[in-house]
Image (cartoon, grey):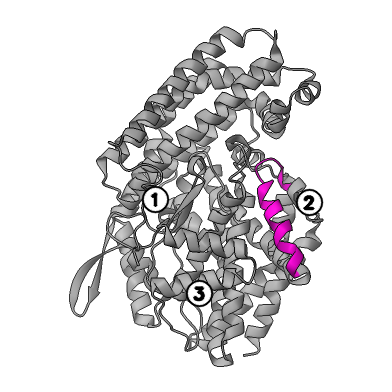
Amino acid sequence: MDLVWSLDDIYKSFDSEEFNSDLCTFYKYIEDINKWSDDNLNSYDNCKEKIEYILINYNDFFDLFMKLISYAQLTLSADAKNKKALSVVEKLEKDMTQITSSKVKFEKYIGEIENIEDLINSSNVIKEYSFYIQELRNKYKYLLTQKEEMSISKMKNTGSDSWTKLQELLTSTLMVDIEEDGEVKKKPLSVIRSMAYDKDSNTRRKAYDAELKSYEKIEESSAAALNSIKGEAITLCKLRGYDGVLQKTLLDSRLDEKILNTLMEAIKESLPMFRMFYNKKAKMLGLNKLAFYDLFAPVGEFDKKYTYEEARDYIVNNFRTFSDELADFADNAFENKWIDAKPRKGKRGGAFCENIHAVKQSRILSNFTGQFNDVVTLAHELGHGYHDYCLKDEKYLNSTYPMPIAETASIFCETIVKKAAMKELEDDKLITILENDISDNAQVIVDIYSRFLFESEMIKRREEGSVSVEELKEIMVEAQKNSYGDGLDENYLHPYMWICKPHYYYADENFYNFPYAFGLLFSKGLYNMYLNEKDSFADKYNKLLSITGRKNIKEIGDTMGIDLEDIEFWRGSIKVIEEDINKFMKI
């Protein structure tokens, strides 16, 4: 089975007739929209017709742009040295700024309409985009002038966007020196990091040491990238009038601060429980304390390796226990080569799922080595793809959902696979999967909490000036101590976690950490509902995913009868994990 994806359903190549035709259409849209905006957004005469026109054209324009740039970005993520792909990404990002002036003009136009509800109710076209319009109005007061927004948009291309690309290039091409069989070999960073799951303690330690050593080659460049990206975010937030970077993130996330604070309170309450688990795991491994490189050490005798085809069958068959629709979606993704699973030099590490709304498809990147964890990762990313599948019939402007809800479907799908594995295994094998599941949950709660602490402190210090490599390492270690506590040996933490996690380098998506914790615990709550409702749940679940592009987070919770401001909901979700930890402690 082919472990490399096909992008042919998007475009055959950068030289294809379809790609170049769409590229021409993209520039025609820019020209037409800009001229129309200059001619028509100066008065409120025929307001309804004007807004209908721009909504329809914006929807089609942004849908086309995402198709073009996704193709280039996907190509680049699989081959970081593809010069053509890099050139196309940079050109599209640069030329996209030409629409900024018209976009700001339209947002101000919308923001200044007094009788907006009457206008929305007067047109079926406008009503379809009502959430999009209301969201524009909520952000209206943070808009700068057209000239300022245009300048910022252009400068980001040579500012934060360039730093993001540099960091991705640095980590995707970093070759790590590691000794094997008396010989020093060079291996991709993604391969070295996967050794954290190795059964042999010496292998894990050797990989950890080699990984940390390798970061010395790129630490200054990475620090420069991080400082530049966060510096830009801080500056823009101040210019626009936000209270801070976190406030902007919450607004973009459609999430109330009260919900975030309630979530964080529940997480802090749960930390002693996870530390207890880590100490139990250390004893099972014959250690006094876990080192950072022992976090993913396998426990028990379940060391089965999966072929890619076996992983496919396992995922599809278990997805079918939830619904045929989910299983058929996953099977189609494998069959039609939507997944790039083969680790190789120049390929980006980690995993992600990219939705290409224009062709109603997704593409998934992973680095499959045959571990059970890799099977879970595939299930996770397929969950993202299924989420996008449930939104395929929505207009593009109604299909984009915020970060916190983005992890819901992915974690739900990985839970299906993990729970299935636990049911199938005898007790001597069960411990491995049980421990693996708890460890994964701990990463999304304990480690994510450390990342939240790190980013909060880093941004605080960056407001005063650039943060040095040594400071970044110190902040990260301190955050890990506060999160992991006595669950880890403080002499063997990971001071460079700020280099290998790409989320810190997303210029427009700061604090891309707490959404994972939100997604995990929200998903745990949904999974409990599924166990109680079974046959009737799948349709409700699909409906939930389908509205995530046109509801805020609280409203999404309300549709399932969940009060996200009530700490008892979050405690109930954590209770699900606690039950597994208690089971593990008795082994």
- 468 over 45 or under it: above or below: below
Q: Which residue is mark 1?
A: 469
| 542 within the magenta span | yes
Q: Decide if residue 581 is on the left or right side of residue 497.
A: right
- On screen, residue 224 above or below 238: below
Q: CA distance from mark 1 to mark 3?
A: 44 Å
Residue located 48% across and 16% down the image: 32
Q: Amino acid at mark 1?
A: Val
Magenta part mainly helix, strand or loop?
A: helix
Q: Residues within 10 Å of mark 1 (few under 14, many from 20)?
A: some
- Residue 586 screen position, x and y as percent: 66, 89
| Residue sitting nearer the eye, 302 or 544 | 544
Q: Quadrant of residue 568?
A: bottom right
The N terminus sits in image quarter: bottom left
Residue name at image x 46 percent, y 20 percent: 30
The residue to which callout 3 is attached is 314
**Image location of residue 361, percent across then percent down:** 49, 49
Spot occupied by residue 46 in the image (x, y as percentages of width and height): 70, 10
Residue 403 position (above or below residue 380): above
- Residue 541: x and y in percent read 70, 58
Residue 326, image quadrant: bottom right
The segment highlighted magenta reads 534-553
Q: CA distance from mark 3 to mark 2?
A: 32 Å
Residue sitting at 70 percent across and 32 percent down?
128
Element at label 2: helix
**Looking at the picture, which amino acid does disc 2 mark?**
Thr
Question: What amino acid type is highlighted by mark number 3?
Answer: Tyr
Disc on the earlier residue, 3 or 2: 3
Task: Identify the residue at the far left of this view.
Answer: 183
Q: Is residue 57 left or right of residue 10?
A: right
Q: CA distance from mark 2 to mark 1?
A: 46 Å
Residue 559 tag number: 2
